[in-house]
Amino acid sequence: MTGSTAMPDESSSSEPTGSSSSGEGDDTTGEASWEPLVFSVMGDVPYEPEEYGILVQQVADHNALSPSEFMVHVGDIKSGSPICFEVTYQDVSTALAGLAVPTFVLPGDNEWNDCILNIDESWAWWEEYFSRFNEAWPASPTVERQEVRDENFAWTSEGVLLVGINLVGGLVHNAEEWAERLDQDAQWVESQFEAHPGVYAAVIFAHANPTGDHTAYVTRMESAALDFGRPVLFIHGDGHSWIDDVPFAAANIRRIQVDRGGNAPPLQVTVEEGAAEVFATERMPF
């Protein structure tokens, strides 16, 4: 394959579970109950240039109508093509910056891994326009970031652990890099589950719908979830159509694949302790 898969600078540390900042830590205060946590998730938008206007309208609608505390874009800001262009990253970054709530962006394969003619350049653009994207909002939560993979983040809010990882689909161009990234993703999830025994639920955000290429990560996520012993929501994009099931060996992991953003508004998720459905979803919130 042409090109090599770029990686964030790992020179600062060899400890994949380390952090560069502290999470909110509200899972250890001994609260008897928590307020419901409401957030939004979108993905695979704008998949085509004509969907840019849809994204802009969704931002406006979200600002006017959504009670969500934050937004997560789970990747794929364009359709797949062998070469990527900086203007795409600029335009989508500008649109998402219009959201009123803190916004996190995870990598998708279409804007990185599948840009086979300029993979390194594409990753540099992703970092320039989306790295630590949430920090543009003064009210953004203080998040913990993995030292060796800065795009992996975590924090707690209202008794819920929230974790983001760089898990993309597409072709495996560099088997060594792919395996190392899956290992780092798994270590991040494991370390976060272990570090937050006081939460009552956890949410993992990623891009890829896991396949056999992700087995090394999935098996460790399943094991960590079983040890965690509380409800886990694994929410991703990639497949463009709604899925809500329990496909993993750990029965406490619920999986949701969000609708393609050009076809549906952002998903609204409410996490509530003691509710009949800990993770309640609204596919058409506005």
Image (spheres, rainbow, N blue to C red):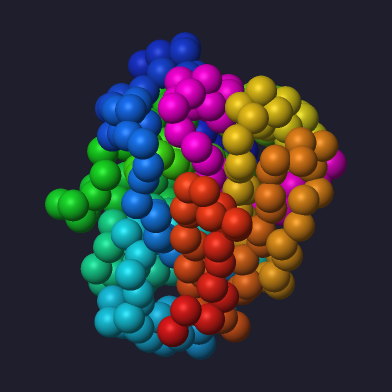
Q: Residue at x 24, y 49 (%)?
A: 140
Position of 168 compared to 86: left or right?
A: right
Q: Is 170 situated left or right of 212 in this image?
A: left
Give the camera-side residue of 171 and 182. 182
Please identify the quarter of the rendering in which residue 145 is found.
top left
Q: Start and end of the magenta stretch?
A: 186-212
State the residue in front, 125 or 284: 284
Of residue 198 and residue 103, the one placed in the foreground of this image is 198
Decide if residue 11 is on the left or right side of residue 107. left
Q: Would residue 260 be visible to someone looking at this image?
A: yes
- Give coordinates of residue 37: x percent, y percent: 39, 54
Q: Is residue 122 above or below residue 179?
A: below
Q: Quadrant of residue 190?
A: top right
Of the 4 image quadrants, the one containing the N terminus is top right
The quarter of the picture where the C terminus appears is bottom left
| Looking at the image, residue 142 lies above or below residue 77 | above
Instruction: Identify whether 55 is placed above or below 194.
Output: below
Q: Quadrant of residue 33?
A: top left
Spot occupied by residue 71 in the image (x, y as percentages of width and height)? 39, 61
**In the image, 31: left or right of 201?**
left
Residue beneath the point at 34% across and 58% down: 70
Residue 203 horizontal/vertical position (percent): 53, 45
Say which residue appears at 29% left-offset and 69% top-offset: 99
